Image (cartoon, coloured by chain):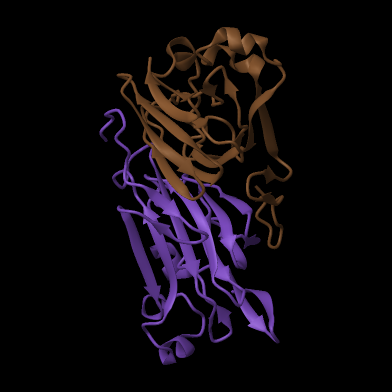
Chain colours: A purple, B brown
């Protein structure tokens, strides 16, 4: 990083729900990437495999695994369902289990699922202005329970890492589904 | 943290520029707390010592010094000047020097001053939607150069700590002052 006087860095900006600027990385998760996380495999297989479920705009100002550094991102989950289960993120523990994370709601409405290593789970409503601390050792997933895009900001340590495998293998102990037009939390 | 099913944590929320909810801590910095940071000591001594220069709403979900945890805050700097120098934050290095931080602009407009340990400094414009990564080993201060309140969000590691003393002793190598109605960066 050049600290010469009057030398501004590339400008990173966000509007309500998009992060933009030179070093932003864009991640897309489609139905084809998420077949394993939804309960109803039959339903997901009949859907357009290229349909986007969620997108993440990330700002990684330091190398992955840097101790003491931070990353920043904005996630947008589309409205939609696979069978009766709402669109959601893959969900993960951090590879370095004691690393925490902040989420804050920007637009739309949904549920943040939190689960500890004993598979005890709970939920928090995520919506514009809500702030959520995700402690270390807690898996986290966001579910869009609304009819509009759900977006949220995130900040996490650059040495947190993502352990997606544990969730892909065993899932969360709760799911959020729609029954008779209303959201219900079901236990696995 | 209790992970019983369906037990939501106390809700923390923010509107455009205020953080609220049960465990939020509010910090006020008045002229009397900041006399040492402004260039014109004579001017600051004649001002109302109880005038608020800035306020910080903080969410500390874990103990101070916890490795891997994070803190979250919103700062509001009032518009105003001490002599010809704009209202600003105390500014600090992190006690654990390698810890980074994110700032993001919410309302108003100002300058983020960044200075390394060799006292090389630069500035970034902070305003609604701007995102700023402050790497480790970099002192940071925000200056409100506008006519309205400047607010910004922040997220930093819970084991970063604040070293205010280095800045109180030596200051930053640049200051932002108003001359003929315009902002100017001056070197110390």
A72 versus B93 height, above or below = below
Q: Nearer the viewer, residue B39 or A67?
A: B39
Residue ID at (53%, 11%): B40
Residue B162 horizontal side relative to residue B7, left or right = left
Residue B153 horizontal side relative to residue A42, left or right = right
Residue at the limit of the structure toward the bottom, as seen here: A46
Residue A178, percent from left and from top: 64, 81
Q: Nearer the viewer, residue B170 or B184?
A: B184
* Quarter of the rendering containing residue A53: bottom left
Residue at the limit of the structure toward the top, as seen here: B42
Q: What quarter of the picture does the C terminus of chain A occupy?
A: bottom right
Residue at the limit of the structure toward the front, as seen here: B180
Residue A37, percent from left and from top: 46, 75
Residue B58 appears anywhere in the view: yes
Residue ID at (61%, 51%): A131
* Quarter of the rendering containing residue A186: bottom right
Q: What quarter of the picture does the N terminus of chain A occupy?
A: top left
A172 versus A4 height, above or below = below
Q: Nearer the viewer, residue B63 or A24?
A: A24
Residue ID at (50%, 26%): B161
Residue A152, percent from left and from top: 53, 59
Residue B74 appears anywhere in the view: no
Please state the total of marks drawn on the protein image: 0
* Quarter of the rendering containing residue A111: bottom right
Residue A70, percent from left and from top: 41, 43
């Amino acid at each position: 990083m050049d600290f010469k006087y009057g030398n501004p860095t590339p400008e990173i900006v966000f509007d309500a729900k998009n992060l933009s600027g030179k070093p932003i990385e864009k991640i897309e998760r489609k139905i084809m990437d998420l077949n394993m996380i939804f309960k109803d495999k039959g339903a997901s297989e009949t859907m357009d495999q290229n349909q986007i479920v969620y997108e993440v705009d990330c700002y990684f100002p330091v190398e992955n695994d840097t101790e003491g550094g931070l990353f920043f991102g904005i996630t947008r989950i589309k409205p939609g369902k696979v069978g009766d289960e709402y669109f959601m993120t893959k969900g993960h523990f951090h590879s370095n289990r004691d690393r925490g994370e902040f989420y804050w709601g920007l637009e739309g409405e949904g549920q943040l699922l939190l689960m500890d290593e004993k598979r005890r789970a709970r939920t928090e409503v995520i919506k514009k202005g809500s702030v959520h601390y995700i402690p270390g050792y807690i898996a986290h997933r966001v579910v869009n329970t609304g009819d509009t895009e759900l977006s949220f900001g995130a900040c996490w340590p650059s040495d947190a890492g993502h352990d997606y495998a544990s969730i892909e293998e065993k899932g969360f102990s709760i799911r959020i589904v729609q029954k008779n037009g209303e959201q219900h939390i079901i236990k696995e």
